[in-house]
Image (cartoon, grey):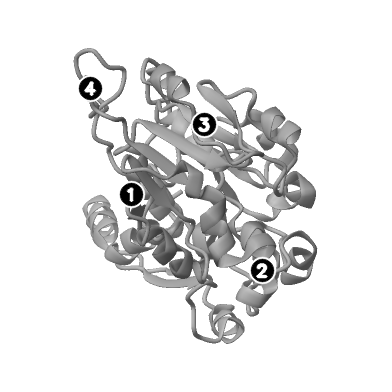
Amino acid sequence: MANILLSVNLVSTWIKIVAEVVLSGVASEYVLGDLADYLRNQGHRVHEIDFASFKGDAVGLLQYLSNSQCTYITSAHTNLTTMTAGMLAPLFAKHYPKYLAPLEILGILRPLRSIYIPHDLLTPFGDGNLNEYRYLDLFDHIFAPFPAPALQAVVGRQTQVHAAGWIKHAKVSPPRVPQSGTGVAGTLPGQTPTVALFISMIEHLRWRYGDQGVFEYFEPLLGPNVIVKLPAWNGVDKIENLFRKHPHCRVFSSVDNSVDLMHRADIVVCNGASSIHAEANLLGLPAICLLDDEGIAAAEQRSKLINLPHIYFHDYKSRSPLPCDLISHLLEVSGSERVSIFDYSRVEAIVSGRD
């Protein structure tokens, strides 16, 4: 009998559990594409709902899957509905009229398991304007980018908080080895450093200035050493084309991973207080915040970033280029990578019911 039970157990370990998985988010806030591919390659039935590109009937799909005991994974703002977004981001509902917040999806899908994976390193557990952290106990699992014992105390025992690393840093990164005489990778003495210019608050800037105005807003910063990346929101291809027409500008595709660009850069620049600043710091890169009162008051931007090391501020109210002495100073600044690699297999273990 013992031999039979042992054989049954051995066979059961080889039986692959195939699960239904639904992932949701929108545009640049949907950071789960590579995870979806991984789960798909593990044999699971994966349904991606990125409301920036999803063309089907999301409600119908969710209703169809509601009795399938599926796993739901999201990187979106938990309670940012189109109605709420209408007050915070006026163009959001126009660009994504069929958007559903995780709060709404949970009610329709009624998943067996639910997982929240933050898309924003600066405010990983929710925007203060939304009181988002109050809704995080709706999830069974939270994959935090770093240890968060205080969050575990808030959400209670029914939600497991995992210190899981950064979802956009899921592959082993190439080492940033400084060249002789410099403090950054890839910059030889006498060469111009590579500056990665990330554009944040794009919906606000488009609402204020239009596509051409967004380009003109950042034009004073452009040069042959600057690579521009916009967030992957609907319609940004029109703005990308404006930058591409500039004789001294390179454009990094909006749909590609921001971390991939950071590994090519020596200095990171971004407007507003953004997750980009936190990402750069965790990767050991100096970052410049363009201070202006657009979207967020300059004083508030400073307060949000004040605890991050190697953050530098440039007054951009007069649209002045970056000072050469600031760039020179940042080339002497070096940091070490301080972010953990995200392990997709930990998510797959939950999806398969092994955790």
Mark 3, residue position: 288
Q: Secondary structure at mark 2?
A: helix
Residues under labels 4 and 1: Cα distance?
19 Å
Residue type beneath disc 4: Gly
Assess whether mark 3 and mark 4 are in contact (beta carbons under 8 angstroms): no
Residues under labels 3 and 2: Cα distance?
27 Å
Q: Is residue 166 left or right of residue 306?
A: left
Mark 3 against mark 2, which lies toward the viewer? 3
Q: Which numbered disc covers residue 248?
A: 1
Q: Residues within 10 Å of mark 4 (few under 14, many from 20)?
A: few
Residue type beneath disc 3: Ile
The first of marks 1 and 2 along the sequence is 2
Is residue 153 or residue 84 the one in the foreground?
84
Q: Position of residue 183 (x, y in %)?
A: 31, 17
Mark 2, residue position: 92
Residues under labels 3 and 1: Cα distance?
21 Å
Q: Residues within 10 Å of mark 2 (few under 14, many from 20)?
A: many
Q: Residue at x 42, y 45 (%)?
A: 222
Question: Is 55 located above or below residue 209 in the figure?
Answer: below
Q: Residue at x 77, y 52 (%)?
A: 130
Q: Residues within 10 Å of mark 1 (few under 14, many from 20)?
A: few
Q: Which numbered disc covers residue 190?
A: 4
Q: Residue at x 64, y 61 (%)?
A: 209
Is residue 127 or residue 108 the one in the foreground?
127
Q: Is residue 63 left or right of residue 326?
A: right
The first of marks 4 and 3 along the sequence is 4
The first of marks 4 and 1 along the sequence is 4
Q: Residues within 10 Å of mark 3 (few under 14, many from 20)?
A: many
Q: Is residue 129 left or right of residue 119?
A: right
Residue 60 visible in the current orientation = yes
